Image (cartoon, rainbow, N blue to C red):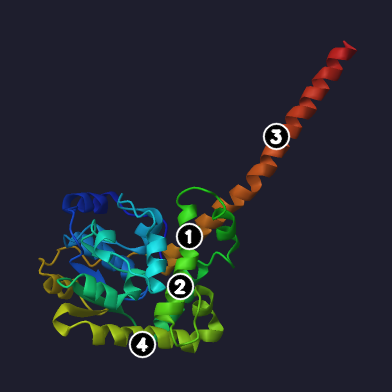
Amino acid sequence: MPSPPHINAITLLLVLAYNVNAEPKVMGLGFGRTGTDSMKRAFIELGFGPSYHMSEVLFEEQGISTEGHNALWQAGANGETVDWASMLKDFNSGGDFPLGAFPKEMRDAFPEAKFVLTTRPSEKWWSSIQSSICWMDVRKTWPLQILTKLPFFPFSRIRAQQPMIDAMIKHKVGAGLGLDSWNSFCDPANKEQTIKAYEAHNARVKALIPPERLLVFETGKSTYADLAAFVGAPTPVSPYPSVNSKEEFANITMGLTVAATAVLLAPLLLIGCLLRCWSRRGGAGKKAKGA
């Protein structure tokens, strides 16, 4: 799951510099909150931008249209045929949900691509999703309930994301584990099953992807040099990116809450202003009659 737009100017310049009409050459297959946002930034810095991510599905951070992608991922989760190569032709890399939930499809669609499985200890991963992306459920989060009623981008995208994510959980991530929606995936009562889904996914990726095409990248332990060597790029002198922390996500949720509150209060403020203007006009009329 994503955060709203935060891509900086330097990253955007890197994206524009490397933007070619070519299929992905390296793709991340880890679950959200395993360092997928940092990996996206690393891919771009290593010369593999633009890089696909949930933030592109929702916000088009890198200026590439992803209109209709929610519906395509949902169709793929439901077992329908999707032209993945056409869908991702403008990206040189990718990762995060929903892409990471389709390891077999990505392997088969991009036979020359390399893959990176971002991981972290199961309990730490569970704690991270509980304090971040599990908040992003339109059905139980009142700011999103308000904002997704707005009929324009990006709120229309967030609204369309919910059924796609539910299909992804039901048919891909949580299949056979009793998880059939994002809500069930995040429910603390289902912690054991959700962790099983996480661990089963990691094992499945390792079984599906040939070892020479797969790098298991443990967030916090693996290095930028490991990643650069795997993709055949020089090791950057800059440190490995670290973005989208729990603290940053808390700021995002606060911003969305403020925005939703403003949407709720705007009609009341308008009515108040109209009533005040009307009362002043009425008072002025009475004074004119008295004169």
Q: Distance between the residues labelled 3 and 4?
A: 58 Å
Please tell me which residue lies in front, 188 or 92. 92
Q: Alpha-carbon neighbours of circle 2 within 10 Å: few (<14), some, or many (≥20)?
A: many
Instruction: Please give the label number shown on residue 71.
Output: none
Q: Distance between the residues labelled 4 and 1?
A: 27 Å
Which residue carries the number 1 mark? Answer: 160
Please state the horizontal and vertical placement of residue 97, each as a whole percent of the image.
37, 70
Q: Earlier in the sequence, mark 4 or mark 2?
A: 2
Q: Which of marks 3 and 2 is nearer the N terminus?
A: 2
Which residue carries the number 2 mark? Answer: 167
From the image, state whether disc 3 or disc 2 is nearer to you.
2
Which residue carries the number 4 mark? Answer: 200
Q: Would you say residue 214 is visible in this rendering?
A: yes
Q: In this view, does 285 lie to the left or right of 169?
A: right
Q: Earlier in the sequence, mark 4 or mark 1?
A: 1
From the image, state whether disc 3 or disc 4 is nearer to you.
4
